[in-house]
């Protein structure tokens, strides 16, 4: 069993007993069907990038803005579906369950090795989340994988954009990865768990899209005064969803206590910095990632109903 890292103290949990009881706490372009986005390191930060007509969630060298406000690529929320943020069918069937992945060894100096690693983790993510959606009685389409070796364009804009190494484009359900870019931006990290976490975080945005959470989020943003807070809730939920996969696949991927701490450190290092307030504090980045890894249940990732201090 993987050891659990340090979390908030007893006084923290005692302040929110009802919430946490409910949450279950005591040089070519390659396209494929599925996920592709991998990246890492304390030198990088997740960022949501504004584009004129669409939006993307990205993993980049620096935080560059907030997600755009359109919903192209996502079906509208049907009348009568209720609150798809805090009361989503995704939250109703329990844990993801054990996930078995067969990932090849990673040679960060070999682009073919990085791409093969990304594909294998993407395949595993596809199987895990497709099975979960099926159990929930929900439709699921695997995201498109787009791996780039040179600059190009997507419905969400050109890439790489201001240092962006990987991003999820809602418009075409595409997960974009700069194979050499993410390695260069990571300082050549050789820790596969960090690349896996980035993959699972970006896939978390696709899970949000498939469950109509992104569409509801965009609708809420349109009339909101606190846009940054909503964006933080979305990003921290993606951390938690990514953590679910990491926790569910920990045995097959060999994720012990040290690897867990590496993942949580990475989540903290991708938190808000400077004048940006779109991804949450270091403490909350760690908290939601750990919560997903420990609970492995999407119901534990309802950041939308969480107290404001947990999404700062």
Image (spheres, rainbow, N blue to C red):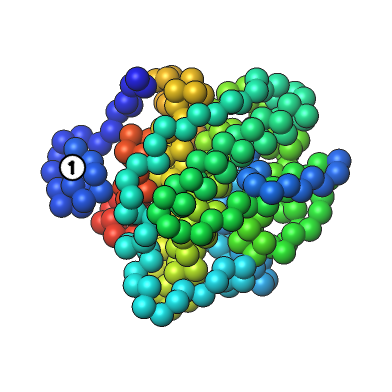
Q: Nearer the viewer, residue 178 or 229?
A: 178
Residue 282 visible in the picture? no
Q: Secondary structure at mark 1?
A: helix
Q: Position of residue 157 (x, y in %)?
A: 72, 62
Disc 1 designates what residue? 13
Q: Name which residue lies at 76% across and 48% down.
A: 31
In this rendering, the answer to whether 103 lies above or below 92 is: above
Q: Residues within 10 Å of mark 1 (few under 14, many from 20)?
A: some
The answer to whether residue 295 is visible is yes
Looking at the picture, how far across and down is residue 299, in whole percent? 32, 50
Q: How many marks?
A: 1
x and y, in percent, of residue 163 in the image: 69, 47
Residue at screen point 45% across, 26% down: 250
- The relative height of residue 204 versus residue 245 in the rendered view (above or below) is below
Q: Residue furthest right?
A: 27
Q: Going 68% across and 52% down the picture, which residue do you hit?
A: 144
Q: Residue at x 35, y 20 (%)?
A: 1
Q: Position of 304 compared to 54: left or right? A: left
Judge left or right: residue 293 versus residue 193: left
Q: Is residue 308 above or below residue 38?
A: below
């Amino acid at each position: 069993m993987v050891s659990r890292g340090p979390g908030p103290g007893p006084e923290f949990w005692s302040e929110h007993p009802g919430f946490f009881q409910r949450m279950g706490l005591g040089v070519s372009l390659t396209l494929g069907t599925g996920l592709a986005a991998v990246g890492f390191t304390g030198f990088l930060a997740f960022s949501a990038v504004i584009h004129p007509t669409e939006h993307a969630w990205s993993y980049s060298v620096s935080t560059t803005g907030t997600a755009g406000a359109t919903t192209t690529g996502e079906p509208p929320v049907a009348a009568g579906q209720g609150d798809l943020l805090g009361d989503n069918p995704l939250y109703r069937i329990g844990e993801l369950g054990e996930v078995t992945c067969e990932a090849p060894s990673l040679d960060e100096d070999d682009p073919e090795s990085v791409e093969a690693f990304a594909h294998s983790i993407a395949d595993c993510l596809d199987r895990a989340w497709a099975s979960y959606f099926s159990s929930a009685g929900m439709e699921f389409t695997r995201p498109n994988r787009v791996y780039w070796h040179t600059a190009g364009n997507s419905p969400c804009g050109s890439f790489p954009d201001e240092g962006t190494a990987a991003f999820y484009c809602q418009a075409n359900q595409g997960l974009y990865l700069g194979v050499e870019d993410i390695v260069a931006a990571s300082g050549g990290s050789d820790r596969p768990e960090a690349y896996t976490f980035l993959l699972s975080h970006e896939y978390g945005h696709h899970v949000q899209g498939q469950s109509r959470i992104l569409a509801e989020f965009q609708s809420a943003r349109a009339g909101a005064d606190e846009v940054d807070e909503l964006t933080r809730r979305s990003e921290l939920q993606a951390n938690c969803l990514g953590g679910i996969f990491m926790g569910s696949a920990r045995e097959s991927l060999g994720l012990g206590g040290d690897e867990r701490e590496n993942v949580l450190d990475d989540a903290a290092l991708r938190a808000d910095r400077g004048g940006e307030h779109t991804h949450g504090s270091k403490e909350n980045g760690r908290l939601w990632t750990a919560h997903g890894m420990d609970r492995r249940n999407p119901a534990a990732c309802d950041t939308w109903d969480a107290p404001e201090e947990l999404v700062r």
